[in-house]
Amino acid sequence: MKAIAGKALLREQPDFVRAAIAHKKFTCDIDAILALDTTRRAKITEAEQARSAQKAANQDMAALPKGTPEFIAKVQEMKAIAGKAKELEVVAKQADDDFQQAFLSIPNLADPSTPIGKSEDENEVAATWGDADAAFPHALPHFDIPWFESRVDFARGVKVTGAGFPFYVGEMSRMVRALVNFFLEEARLSGYEEVLPPLVVNEASATATGQLPDKEGQMYVDPKEGLYLIPTAEVPVTNFYRDEILDADQLPVRRCAYSPCFRREAGSWGAHVRGLNRLHQFDKVELVKWTDAESSMEELEKLRGDVEQLLQKLELPYRVLRMCTGDIGFPHAKQYDLEVFAAGQQRWLEVSSCSNFTDFQARRAAIRYRGPDGKPVTAHTLNGSALAVPRVLAAILENNLQADGRVKVPSCLQHWMQQEFIGVAK
RNA sequence: GGAGAAGUGGCUGAGUGGCCGAAAGCGCUUCUUUGCUAAAGAAGUGAACCUCAAAAGGGUUCCAUGGGUUCAAAUCCCAUCUUCUCCGCCA
């Protein structure tokens, strides 16, 4: 079923595409796009024939001695031919642009292994780890811990920048750094090569990974330079190989990257997003993979396993959701969300999303590899958070709160923290 | 930020209006030959799109990007981007 993709799939199996899209939460008019494709092809053929005729006439032209009567007569004739060809080319270009733009509005199709469903209520729990029902006798919502605001200073963040840009102070700043180090080191040991990406990207990059044209409202923009603050390291890291053809034997490529992430999250502020639950700027380590067209689903499972390892070492109870067709994103074919249990808030907090985009991003980004016959084949891209710092930190604070009011530092972070507890004893 | 120079295929590098998708060399692939990984010879070797049931074949486009001049542009003009040199500034 996956043998054909992109334009060919649309042309040859429009009903299949239509049905597949109906399961996702996006709509697009397949018939209109097919009509644009038909027009586009007809116009291109017309224009190419005109140009071909012009080139043939041009050959004769080139053979004539300049300035002769024949030459001058020929110039007049050629003017008409060239004008006609140019006109047809303008039409063809327009038809092609119209189609390409419409084509970008088609979401990626869900993989058959993605459960069909309309909303988040139909996501499946693929796995759970740890005991969320265990007694956490001392747990509090992290924002209610008495010393919390002295170590994550929201008020000063508001003064200096605005809501959602806290200062992490002292040992909390070190906790962030410890988590980032832990995540990066684990990723390295799992075979991901570390990169430190640019934190701003251009329009082409944001388009390739799917942030544009849809979600520009979610990014901070510098309109003067046409640059965007990255909402995730996925954007610069995936674009690393944009417009390139890779060797098949270098796949899969696995990369990890730490970066701050900037999200405007316009309109989504309120009572449910207190404390570290949702911020405009946060730290995250991202895993990105480029694979061939055959092994991406297998690599997604490995990716998910790599992320699960982190939560297990942190000893945080979590669950893995297999997101249903109605809840996965526009560019996604398959997606797992990993949620940790925050015992103080008695809530599951999403700390990672592991996704297979199949060839969706790679097609936009023109990331390819040489197939067995030497021809370029569109690659597959995947990514997953490993992990988003603030919510992991929130869960650690809540779940590890001790009777004396301090928080126990997970043993896997000891190496970087060099202390067993943080916070102030009662 | 100011002043200059330059951007050609995987790389080096010819090409200043039509015979140039583009010489040559390198690299790569296949074949031939010599008793080893080396050398020599032969052929081949970019991408996108259109056409075609598919393959073959045919066609169009692409010489940083976008416009323009012209019957005709890698070649002329304009803008932008990038790189290099010098100056300024700065971690």
Image: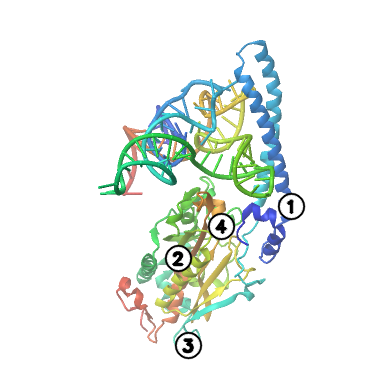
Q: Mark 1–mark 4 contact, CB under 8 Å?
A: no
Chain hosting mark 4? A
Q: Is A86 located above or below residue A411 in the figure?
A: above
> Image check: A97 left or right of A157?
right
Q: Mark 1–mark 2 contact, CB under 8 Å?
A: no
Task: Give the residue pinned by disc 3.
Answer: A134
> Image check: A372 left or right of A29?
left
Comes first in the chain, label 4 or label 2:
2
Instruction: Tell me if residue A93 can be seen.
Output: yes
Task: Give the residue pinned by disc 2.
Answer: A166
Residue A126 placed where, x, y %?
55, 77
**Where residue A359 is drawn, which disc sits there?**
4
Dot 4: element? loop
Amino acid of disc 1: Ala
Residue B23 placed where, x, y %?
45, 29
Residue A226 placed where, x, y %?
53, 47
Q: Mark 3–mark 1 contact, CB under 8 Å?
A: no
Comes first in the chain, label 4 or label 3:
3
Q: Is B1 located above or below residue A290 in the figure?
A: above
Quarter of the image with the C terminus of chain A in it: bottom left
Could you give the CA–CA distance between mark 1 and mark 4, rounded to whole angstroms?
23 Å
Residue A187 location, quadrant? bottom left
Dot 3: element? loop
Comes first in the chain, label 3 or label 1:
1
Amino acid of disc 4: Asp
